[in-house]
Amino acid sequence: MKWFPRLLLAALLVGVPAAALWSQAARSGADAAQVVTLHARMPEQGGWSLDEIRAEVGQEMRFRLTSDDVVHGFAIARSGMEPISLEPGRWREVRWRPQAPGEYTFYCTRWCGPNHWRMTGTIIVVDPQGIYPTSTAAPPPRFVRYGVDIDSREAIERLTGVRPSAQRGAVPGLAPQGAWLDPKDPDLTTPIEAWNRLRADPALTALDDAALWDLLAYLWTDRLDRDQVRRGLETFQANCAACHGPQGGGDGVMAEAFADPPVASFTDLARMATASTVVLEGKILRGGMGTGMPYWGSILEPAQVDALVQAIWWMALSGEGSQAP
Amino acid sequence: MSLPRAASLTLLALALAALVAPWPFTSPAVGERVVRLTARQFAFDPPQVEVAQGERVVLELTSADVVHGLYLDGYDIELKVDPGQRARASFIADQVGTFRMRCSVTCGPLHPFMIGELKVRPAGGGARILLGASLATLAGLVGLRDDDEALRD
Amino acid sequence: MKRSGTEGFELTARPWLRRLLVSRWPQWSLMAVALAFFAYVVLAGFFGTPVGNRNIAITLVWIAWWAALVLVLVPVGGRLWCSICPIPAPGEWLQRGGLMASDGRRTRGLKRRWPRRLRSLWLQNAGFLALALFSAVILTTPRVTAWVLLGLVLLAVAVSLVFERRAFCRYLCPVGGFIGIYALAAPLALRVRDPDVCRTHPTKDCYRGNAQGFGCPWMTYPGTLDRNADCGLCLECLRTCPLDNVTVVLQPLGADLGPRRGRPPLSIDEAYKGFILLAAALVYGAVMMGPWSALKDAAFQVGSGPWFLYAAGLLLLALLLLPGLYLLAAWIGDRLARRPAGGLRRGFLLAATGLIPLGLGGWIAFSLGFLFANGSYVLSTLSDPLGWGWDLLGTAGLAWRPALTGLVPALQGAALVAGLAWATRLTSRAFAETTESRRAALRRAAPVLLLQAALGAALMGVML
């Protein structure tokens, strides 16, 4: 009987944990996939546990993911992967097989504080055999090609507080005679340039300044693709509203953290009057230098950026805020 | 059962009733009350909310930092919200009392202690507690006579 | 008047139960299981997820064990937990030279006697307060909990090797003091059938040990044992007594809380334990169940300015403010009763009697709130103890959901009301039994009863 207590204690202290470990190891199974264990933590606590992951093209990857503090999300940009939610202390698994060599950005998809968008990492997919086609390098964005300086724009103080409305501007029979868009590329047009052209239009001399802004708003939003606006507003609510505000007013819950320079307001005509589609696109792709604006070039698809820009114009000029058309 | 013991137990029951029983003398209010709450690690703002019994309460929750939730004791209502978004729930405040609002999404170390309070008037707060404590003390004193009788027996 | 010897219902009168208690196996097995869980918990704390509510280091210890201790084990069984507590086990096994040694004549270690000056609750009081200052961190951080638990075991082993018996449990364990004074309210008790048999028994096997078992590890002489505070229910004396004079009884409620031979039921160090625990119940209730986030942050940000304020506030409340209020109430009572026998010191200690049911009621209310709000974490972490993504019992995916939130306030209210009423009754009785006239007793008690009612109301305000 002397050995029995020892046996019992050994069984409890070693046997039970070993059995638990074995049963769970057997459950998870093993395969040829490359296993990547990734812990999400708030950016202030170090962000992702890995900044850089190396992978081989065509080789399946198995991500084992958890969060160590608050709710985070995980997605690989431009992979077609649906974002998954990471709850603290719970594990999720997702598999991914890179189809082309290159650098992929993985990022957090649920807001986790003001520095949420700094929570990114890179997957470097190599092709040792050199048999997979390399994806063609994306052309440089338009602001680079056109040489537009997206960081120096003036505010037009007299327009502060002016809220044009496309609804008011939709007067039947009222139309400009001449061209009001930028002749080189319509997307280079800024609202103030367009307005000045309309002001000079002899057909519209009867309108006062405010009514002319309403007409511009109508003409401008009439050019937007309604479906793209809807998609853009969804992307905006999920990714941008926490700073830029649910109505685009620059008053989101995180805005306090970025007081200098303040978060851009899309409903402030004084600022928006000097923006153009090319400028907005550039800001989104490149991010704001020295501001809290993250860099989206590696995350969003070109069509998503286009949708976002259209949604921003909608919020700025439709008079309907973030209400979808 | 001896008389003092019975009296003591009655007083105990009354003390408890004073603390937690529904208030019988109420005239339920009508109308709607929108309660806007901002959640942040580890508090709700405002931390204490008061509504009147019978009001339709619309809870509107936003978050200022990370994903939070709200679970309302007693009413079994749950909301979850991402920062910058808004979650809503509405209910009729038919139960009177103080109910804790607890964060329902793990949001950091102090998450289990992230608590707010919803008071549904007439909760009586201080008066209830004063009455409860007095009755409990009285119950203890009356119970003493029970010991005396037992000693005499 | 409370006397030594048995009162109430004798459990050991049943032969089968007596055999079960005398045998080392049942108790040892429970202790071994508790030790295993203790080891799992420490491992989980070090190697499991840092997310507290997904790690058994937090859920099993601070939700499940704590609730079991405060809601069941202590109010019913007193020091029942101490009888299977795993913390002293490794040290005791080293001391006894075997996992299940039974020969009490052979023990190892330096066997020093515990210093006379330290034979009180003061070290435990200090230890409990020291932990209380960091409680917001300990309760939420698995790694810190693991360090604390590991530290306690190592300390217990070290103390076992240097000092005789269970000096750690009796004089150092921070939880031991908590359990000890509230055990005074518990019905389960170990007593001797006839104190005269012990008095005339020459060898005192229960204290010295014999071939059947060890001399009282708690350094208590069972022959004169008349209160639960210093008996760990380890049952060694049940095994060693050659005269079959030791029994386990269910005694009448509050039997340990009356004045003993005219002396107050609590000593000054025990009264202070009562103040500390009452203060802790109030502060924990405010920090962990209240809506005041600045207080929560202060309690958690150890080392910051607000934390020092919080720590100072807690210490002030426990060591000066509460004792000061009791002293003031006792002084006023002393004056009102025109200086009764025993004077202010005795009045102060008699007043402190009510701290036991009042504080216990507060802790029960606190633990009820915590258990029903967070109990679902225990179920989910049992399946995934380390937060590694396991699912042992199929409950890992269980979502957090508070239980019975409509009923819990009533249960909490009942605990607080009962605690206050019992405190009132005990205090009045204590004064009545030790004061010459009824009138003087009432005058002496009145200010104390008022203070108790106010503190009861404060507990209600915080917990409800």
Image (cartoon, rainbow, N blue to C red):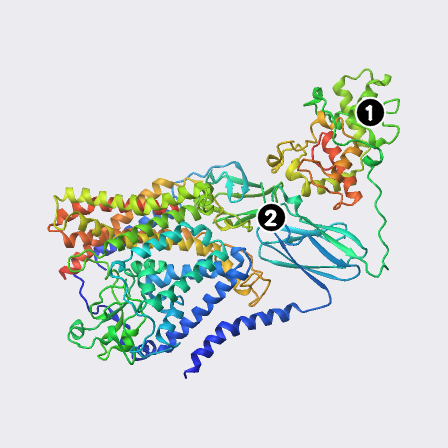
What residue sits 49% from the left and 51% below the top? B112
Disc on res. C246: none
For the residue pair C292 and B8, the one nearer the viewer reads as C292
Residue extending farthest to the bottom is A1
Residue extending farthest to the left is C436
Quadrant of the rendered image containing residue C188: bottom left
Q: Mark 2 lies on which chain?
A: A
Give the image location of residue A100, x and y in percent: 81, 55
Disc 1 vs disc 2: Cβ atoms closer than 8 Å?
Answer: no
**Which of disc 2 and disc 1 is earlier in sequence?**
2
- Spatial separation of the CA atoms under disc 1 and disc 2: 54 Å
Amino acid under disc 2? Met
Dot 1: element: loop
Q: Can residue C380 be seen in this view?
A: no
Q: Nearer the viewer, mark 1 or mark 2?
A: 2
Residue extending farthest to the front is C110
For the residue pair B142 and C452, the one nearer the viewer reads as C452
Q: In this view, does A129 lie to the left or right of C121?
A: right
- Which quadrant is home to the N terminus of chain B? bottom left
Give the image location of residue B72, x and y in percent: 50, 47
Q: Is residue C301 left or right of residue A175?
A: left
- Would you name the residue on which mark 2 appears? A42
- Would you name the residue on which mark 1 appears? A172
- Which quadrant is home to the C terminus of chain B? bottom left
What residue sits 29% from the left and 80% below the top? C212
Q: In this view, does C50 lie to the left or right of C1?
A: right
Figure check: C184 above or below C332 = below
What residue sits 36% from the left and 71% below the top? C92
Figure check: C223 above or below C62 = below
